[in-house]
Image: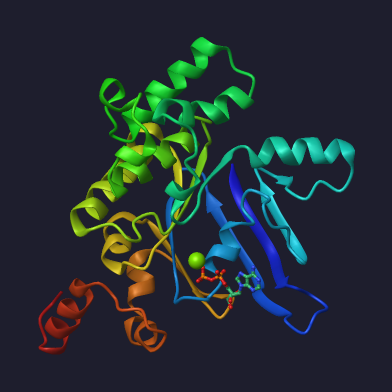
Amino acid sequence: MSIELKHVNYTYMAGTPFEHQALQDVSLTITEGSFTAIAGHTGSGKSTLVQHLNGLLHPSDGQVLVDGVDLEGHDKARKKAAHAASQQVGMVFQYAETQLFEETIAEDIAFGPRNQGLTEAAVQERVREAMELTGLDYKMFKDRSPFQLSGGQMRRAAIAGILALHPRYLVLDEPTAGLDPSGRKALIRQIQSLHKEWNLTILFVSHSMEDIARYADRIIVMNKGSVMYNGAPKEVFAHYQELEKIGLAAPQVTYIMHDLKEKGLPV
Ligand code: ADP
Ligand code: MG
């Protein structure tokens, strides 16, 4: 099982003077069970790319397949299959907490599962489970207003709302943006435990090469709408000079290893 992009192009506002090609011939595979990071400077196409993974955007050219199903169902029968496939992909947008809107945390998280037609008991079970998975104590937080939470807690509540839908793939667009260092660390750890303990396939967009190096088993580097590198962290960071040229620093340890090698040490 996997998510597959085949020669995807995407152009915003095609046919207008503002036409802009944001993705160019992007082909890649996200294998089930992996923890993949997408890096790249601002405007390199990361958010455009991830919005293709649950069918929010459809390619101008090319295909997106989730478990072999084309997300752009081209007729009624295939649209149904496409919708079902897209539900396997949970999408946490950048600053997801701005989309919290119910009066209580529990009601907000319940919204998605309730729409899926689950029984009320099953919905409550999903809410409890999703809160625990994101480190929000159920009893303590369930009746609180989203607006009584810290920034980090609000973001967790937003992620819980997605987890409550039981996706198999979890896509997070810059999930740590705007959090303080301890909030970032805690959230990344939480995401890692979702990967390890809940077997969720994780795809996360990040600027922090330190986070990426520590947690990802695969790194995709985007540059000007194209895939520049796609490989294991070690392979990608071997290109640290090229990464610097596009404004991405490799993690500190890469430089240390490089210096030691230059001094002739066997590292
Ligand atoms: P990233 O997430 O890597 O910062 P984006 O995918 O948001 O990059 O943007 C890629 C390119 O597409 C940028 O040049 C951006 O200005 C452009 N873009 C993004 N969203 C839109 C939009 N809604 N309309 C027009 N252009 C857009
Ligand atoms: Mg973005």
Q: Quadrant of the N terminus?
A: top right
Q: Position of residue 212 (x, y in %)?
A: 33, 62
Number of numbered discs visible in the structure rendering: 0
Q: Is residue 265 left or right of residue 206?
A: left
State left or right for residue 77 relative to residue 43: right
Against 234, residue 156 (above or below) is above
Residue depicted at x 36% and y 79%: 248
In the image, residue 175 lies at what x, y percent?
Answer: 39, 54
Q: Position of residue 194 (x, y in %)?
A: 36, 38
Instruction: Please name the residue shown 43% across and 24% down the image.
Output: 127
Q: Is 23 or 253 nearer to us in this picture?
A: 23
Quadrant in which the C terminus appears: bottom left
Q: Report the side of 135 relative to 206 (left or right).
A: left
Residue 17, placed above or below residue 179: below
Q: Quadrant of residue 83?
A: top right
Residue 196: image location, x then y, percent: 33, 38
Residue toward you, 205 or 14: 14
Give the vertical position of 232 relative to 141 (above or below).
below
Q: Residue at x 56, y 58 (%)?
A: 50
Q: Residue furthest right?
A: 75
